[in-house]
Image (tube, helix red, strand yellow):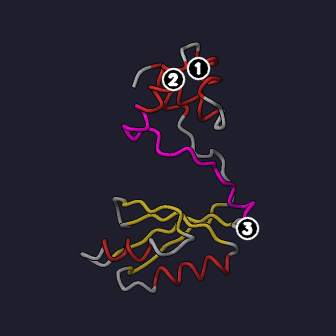
Amino acid sequence: MDALDARLLATMRAHPRIGLTELARLLGVARGTVQARVEKLTTRGVIVDFGPTIDLTKVGYPILAFVWLQIAQGRLTEAVEALSTVPEILEVHGTSGQHDLLCRVAAKSTEHLQDVIATILASPAVQRTDSTIALSTQIPFRVEPLLGA
């Protein structure tokens, strides 16, 4: 990845609905160059999607929680399969330390969050949960500082 790729990605993040022609104009390069770069970055898996970022509070899920899980020895695959069926689980990361997985969870209310946690615990592969509710987002997900570094 070079400086042009970084500028291209930062511009696409800043203007998610931008067309290739306008992107080329802002970057000061030919449209064909932009198209080739976008295709290359997509093929390499650098650009993962072109979908909109959705504000979950606006669609009825104002509670964001992080739920740590301890998994029964040797049952990680079973746990992940069970978690993948829970629509409120937005993402799951394998972690080091005393917990095995970290889940990002959206909920309609604290009662709904409790139901989601009960669903998670219904899997015999999950031994224990520890949850934290996010009160606010101080720095939203970002990649621009990395692209500029």
Q: Position of residue 58 (x, y in %)?
A: 75, 60
Q: Residues within 10 Å of mark 2 (few under 14, many from 20)?
A: many
Decide: is 40 above or below 56: above
Which quadrant would residue 41 be assigned to in this image? top left
Numbered badge on residue 24: 1
Q: Which residue is denoted by mark 3 in the rendering?
A: 60
Q: Residue at x 67, y 67 (%)?
A: 63
Amino acid at dot 2? Val
Q: Residue at x 60, y 35 (%)?
A: 13
C-alpha separation, residue under disc 3 versus residue under disc 1 = 38 Å
Label 3, secondary structure: give it: loop
Picture coordinates of residue 89, whole percent (x, y): 53, 68
* Residue at (53, 84) in percent of width and height: 118
Q: Quadrant of residue 116?
A: bottom right
Of the pair 102 and 14, the residue shown nearer to us:
14
Task: Name the residue beneath numbered marker 2.
Answer: 34
Please report whichever mark, 3 or 1, sits nearer to the chain's N-terminal start. Answer: 1
As drawn, the residue found furthest toward the left would be 74
Q: First in sequence: mark 3 or mark 2?
A: 2
**37 and 138: which one is in front?**
37
Quadrant for residue 102, please give it.
bottom left
Neighbor class of circle 1 (other Cα within 10 Å; few <14, some 14-19, many 20+) is some
- Position of residue 27 in the picture relative to residue 43 (left or right): right
Can you give x and y, in whole percent of width and height, for residue 95 in the image? 37, 59
